[in-house]
Amino acid sequence: MTTFSPSRAFALELDSQDELASFREQFVITDPDLLYMDGNSLGRLPKVAVERARQLVKTEWGNDLIRGWNKGWWEAPRRVGDKIGTLIGAAAGQVIVSDTTSVNLYKLTMAALRLQSGRKRIITDQFNFPSDLYILQGVASFPGGDLRNTQYEIIRIPAADDDITPDLAALESAINEDTALVTLSHVLFKSGYLYDMRAITDLAHRKGALVLWDLSHSVGALPIALDDCNADLALGCTYKYLNGGPGAPAFLYVNKKIQEKVSSPIWGWWGQNRPFDFGLDYEPAPGVDRFLVGTQPMLSLLTMEAALEPLLQAGMDRLRAKSILLTDYASTLTEERLAPLGFSPGSPRDSARRGSHISIRHTDAYRINRALIEEMNVIPDFRAPDNLRLGFAPLYISFADVWDVVDRIRTVMMEKRYEKYPKEKLAVT
Ligand SMILES: *Cc1c(COP(=O)(O)O)cnc(C)c1O
């Protein structure tokens, strides 16, 4: 492991050796002093996306009008899906862009349960993103079709003692012959813990369970090998590390080996075999396309397609190498400079088990977060109960940024700037 020296000059030295440093110039940066540490929640705007959006609105919407559907709009969910596929180790024909992460989780969970009829157990963990847990609860409480008489049991794997890591022994023993589905976030949204995709997938398969991975916090941050790990199903957001823009549509993956066996619970015309026959009865489209539902938000989808370019150019291996160095550096600086001020780690120390964000804990994390945003020109975020979360998007975060964030947090603490903020929380934290 790299030995980090505590001076800012050392951060500048790391920046001078960073072969990805110039990618920052590919992003719109209106305020060079702003330390934007929330790229894991809403990525920055790539310049190429600005150009693409302008052209889309003026030329394609404004001039082409409905002809646009025959000039690349109609195929966009598959075309862009295949591009995202190259980032997640999925061969062509297995990924589509469609709807939202939450809705895709509903579609894929229902599809998995139908395939696994007779099995009643759904396994997830208590760290999963709440929307994921709610979708599972909704599925279990409101089954339809041939799921009607099945009483599903949702098991939430608890934390190991430090509340950072899931209890892997509990996970292993929970997966049994009655398990229909194991569904987990690949990287946990609070602690940044990174599951071993291959090991968990193998574990589930040995008991005949299917696995569905939510890649929202790993896609674009680290290399993923869905095909190679023999994953069954996956999905994720495009507005986090993929920089697709607020509300950009999500993606989903269905492994080739089960594509012809699964059905979507929402039968829309985009998922129909021959939509322009306007036939009266549904017949599923071949392959993963059957998980499309209806007309997609083209302005957003095609802008997101352009936004992928810097990421595709940089390549996931180089991004991961920088991400590990950034988060190791941040962890070291936290230990040396913030632990004495009452912070404790909220993320794994081992980079092999960590995504590209870290949480640091403090009982006053909410008010510290407010002070950083309002007075220090830093944007982290707060995740209850006590996590100050920092995202290190390797395309545009520098090592000097890491040093500066820690330094500005120190200023807030030494000058007790957070104390004047109320403890009541704003709507969006
Ligand atoms: C960000 C995120 C979501 C968000 O879902 P939306 O449907 O886009 O609101 C869901 N799950 C996980 C794990 C996430 O990180």
Image (spheres, rainbow, N blue to C red):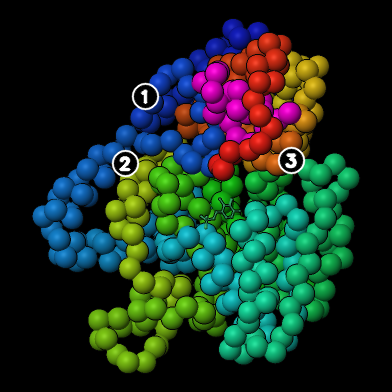
Residue ID for mark 1: 30
Which image quarter holds the C terminus? top right
Q: Is residue 59 magenta?
A: no
Give residue 394's mark.
Answer: none
Which residue is at 34% across, 52% downward?
300
Above or below: residue 42 compared with residue 301: above
Read off the residue under disc 3: 385
Please name which of the two marks, 3 or 1, marks the residue nearer to the observer. 3
Tell us which disc is closer to us: 3 or 2: 3
Q: Label 1 is placed on what type of residue? A: Thr
Please tell me how crowded label 2 is: few (under 14), some (14-19), or many (20+) other residues with Cα within 10 Å: many
Q: Are marks 3 and 1 in contact (CB under 8 Å)?
A: no
What stretch of residues is rendered in magenta?
364-382
Q: Label 2, secondary structure: give it.
A: helix
Ligand 1 image-quadrant field: bottom right
Could you give the CA–CA distance between mark 1 and mark 2, rounded to whole angstroms? 15 Å
- Marks 3 and 1, the one that precedes in the sequence: 1
Label 3 or label 2, whichever comes before in sequence order: 2
Q: Which mark is residue 49?
A: 2
x and y percent of residue 415 in the render? 68, 11
Quadrant including the N terminus:
top right
Q: Quadrant of residue 129?
A: bottom right
Amino acid bearing label 2: Ala
Cβ of mark 3 under 8 A from ligand 1: no
**Height in image: 121 above or below 60?**
below
Residue at 18 percent across and 55 percent down: it is 61
Instruction: Give the alpha-carbon distance from disc 3 to disc 2, as whole Å.
Output: 36 Å
Q: Judge left or right: residue 316 versus residue 387.
A: left
> Disc 3 marks which amino acid?
Pro
Point out the tag, 1 or 2, that comes first from the N-terminus: 1
| x, y percent for residue 421 | 64, 25
Mark 3 lies on a secondary structure that is loop
